[in-house]
Image (cartoon, rainbow, N blue to C red):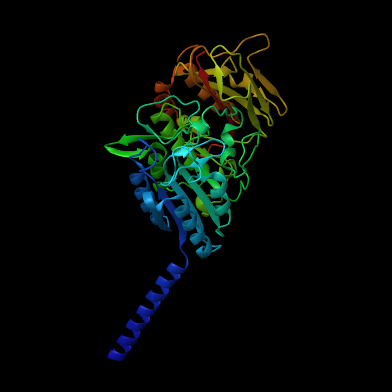
């Protein structure tokens, strides 16, 4: 082979490599990763885990094909974040994916804000409100839009646990009463700027996927994991992303199971309901996406959300996120599909107990479309007997066998249920059959009980 031929082949290879590089650069999914550990205007409110969260999140996103822009502390002012989003808006192509991640303090609930490096102690003008964030992200011409938030929007009813929280309270936000119902729909991040009524789905529910660390009446926690500080949500989110789940619902199951076990079921990552059966980041799914979620164990099932108020909706009266000790409470479960209803309570005592069906038999919990189940029965009284946090979860199963397994695990602790500390290990032991057609929908209500 002559030298000219060798040179020609070498030149051809170089040109092809260059074209490949240019093609890769021309198509790059975009991610904006923002973290704020240091708040110069907020006294004693610095965090320690956001830098670790953002660095590792950026690494994982790069491995998933994203081109990452990272904003830290002083770069992450309100104007800095919005300008970075506008820059992506002008360069992102309709064939590319977009993701926004934030780790730092939150404030809320009306309006819901994330606190930037420039946020002020008693003035919200330097905060980034959910409305503004949602508006600019909707304008990005991407094939999929994702928002991941490791912050919180209200600590109205959460008792403090060990570790740090990502919530900052202003005097102007104190005394704001949250509604108890429809907490599990992410309506406070919908961009409509209100929390005044039972909105059943977020605005733009099918165009922007929100996956958040906590609900509107919860704080997001930081902990030390083997000597390294992380947001609890991000720690388990990173683990699950590395496992490459197919669907958003599968990701939510894994993250929520880890978070619930770590913080005693007091923080609940929330996914936009319309995305439960949607492929992660808009990826193609081998065999096609399916609306059927297939948890591997009862523990994953216990923590999975599949919110559809048209099929199951638990309504509390009074519709307040905090009540007084001894105040009477009533619950109404509205059923919009046939199935097997299970109603569980995680009480102030720390025990998880069965509220319906009282027999613990799925056949006694069989309900039909249009049925309404009330708790307590007429003439009886339901009230919390100690201050703290209460949570009720309604689950409508298609399988009586799975419903029976869940109830049997809960009832193993006796008439008063099982201590939550014992629940994860017990439910992890019960593996579900691979390929089984398990369908379910959930509805939750959480409220705080205040001493008189």
The spot of residue 164 in percent (x, y) is 36, 32
Q: Residue furthest toward the top?
A: 379
The spot of residue 88 in percent (x, y) is 49, 60
Using the image as rendered, state which of residue 324 and residue 240 is in the foreground: 324
Using the image as rendered, state which of residue 81 and residue 181 is in the foreground: 81
Q: Residue furthest toward the right?
A: 370
Q: What residue is rendered at 42% in x and 24% in y?
A: 426
Examine the image and state in which quarter residue 7 appears.
bottom left
Residue 72 seen in the current view: no
The spot of residue 191 in percent (x, y) is 59, 45
Q: What residue is rendered at 63% in x and 24% in y?
A: 319
Does residue 117 appear to the left or right of 182 in the view shown? left
Using the image as rendered, state which of residue 352 and residue 179 is in the foreground: 179
Q: What residue is rendered at 50% in x and 65% in y?
A: 91
Q: Residue furthest toward the front?
A: 122
Using the image as rendered, state which of residue 211 and residue 175 is in the foreground: 175
Residue 90 seen in the current view: yes
Q: What residue is rendered at 64% in x and 30% in y?
A: 312
Examine the image and state in which quarter residue 337 appears.
top right
What is the total number of numbered labels drawn onto the structure image? 0
Which quadrant holds the N terminus? bottom left
């Amino acid at each position: 082979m002559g030298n000219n031929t060798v040179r020609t082949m070498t030149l051809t290879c170089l040109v092809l490599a260059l074209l490949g590089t240019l093609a890769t650069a021309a198509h790059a999914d975009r991610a904006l990763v923002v973290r704020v550990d240091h708040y110069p205007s907020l006294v004693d409110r610095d965090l320690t885990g956001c830098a670790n969260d953002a660095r590792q999140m950026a690494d994982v996103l790069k491995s998933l094909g994203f081109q990452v822009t990272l904003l830290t502390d002083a770069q992450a002012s309100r104007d800095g974040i919005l300008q970075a989003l506008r820059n992506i808006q002008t360069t992102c192509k309709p064939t590319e994916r977009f993701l926004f991640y934030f780790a730092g303090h939150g404030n809320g609930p009306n309006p819901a804000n994330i606190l930037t490096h420039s946020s002020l102690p008693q003035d919200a003008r330097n905060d980034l409100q959910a409305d503004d964030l949602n508006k600019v992200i909707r304008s990005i011409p991407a094939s999929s839009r994702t928002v991941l938030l490791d912050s919180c929007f209200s600590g109205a009813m959460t008792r403090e646990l060990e570790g740090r929280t990502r919530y900052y309270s202003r005097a102007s936000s104190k005394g704001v009463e949250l509604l108890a119902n429809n907490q599990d729909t992410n309506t406070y991040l919908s961009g409509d700027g209100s929390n005044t009524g039972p909105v059943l789905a977020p605005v733009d529910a099918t165009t922007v996927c929100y996956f958040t660390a906590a609900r509107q009446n919860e704080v997001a926690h930081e902990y030390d994991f083997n000597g390294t500080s992380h947001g609890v949500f991000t720690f388990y989110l990173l683990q699950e992303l590395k496992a490459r789940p197919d669907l958003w619902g599968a990701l939510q199951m894994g993250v929520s199971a880890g978070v619930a076990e770590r913080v005693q079921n007091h923080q609940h990552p929330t996914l936009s309901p319309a995305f439960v059966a949607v492929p992660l980041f808009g990826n193609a799914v081998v065999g096609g996406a399916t609306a059927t979620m297939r948890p591997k164990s009862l523990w994953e099932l216990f923590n999975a959300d599949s919110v559809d108020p048209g099929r199951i909706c638990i309504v509390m009266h009074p519709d307040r996120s905090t009540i007084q000790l001894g105040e009477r409470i009533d619950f109404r479960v509205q059923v919009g599909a046939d199935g097997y209803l299970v109603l569980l309570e995680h009480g102030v005592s720390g025990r998880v107990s069965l509220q319906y069906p009282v027999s613990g038999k799925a056949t006694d919990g069989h309900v039909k479309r249009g049925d309404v189940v009330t708790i307590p029965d007429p003439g009886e009284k339901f009230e919390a007997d100690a201050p703290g946090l209460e949570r009720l979860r309604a689950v409508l199963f298609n399988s009586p066998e799975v419903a029976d397994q869940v109830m049997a695990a809960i009832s193993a602790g006796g008439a008063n249920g099982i201590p939550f500390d014992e629940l994860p290990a017990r439910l992890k032991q019960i593996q579900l059959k691979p390929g089984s057609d398990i369908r379910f929908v959930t509805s939750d209500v959480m409220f705080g009980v205040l001493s008189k």
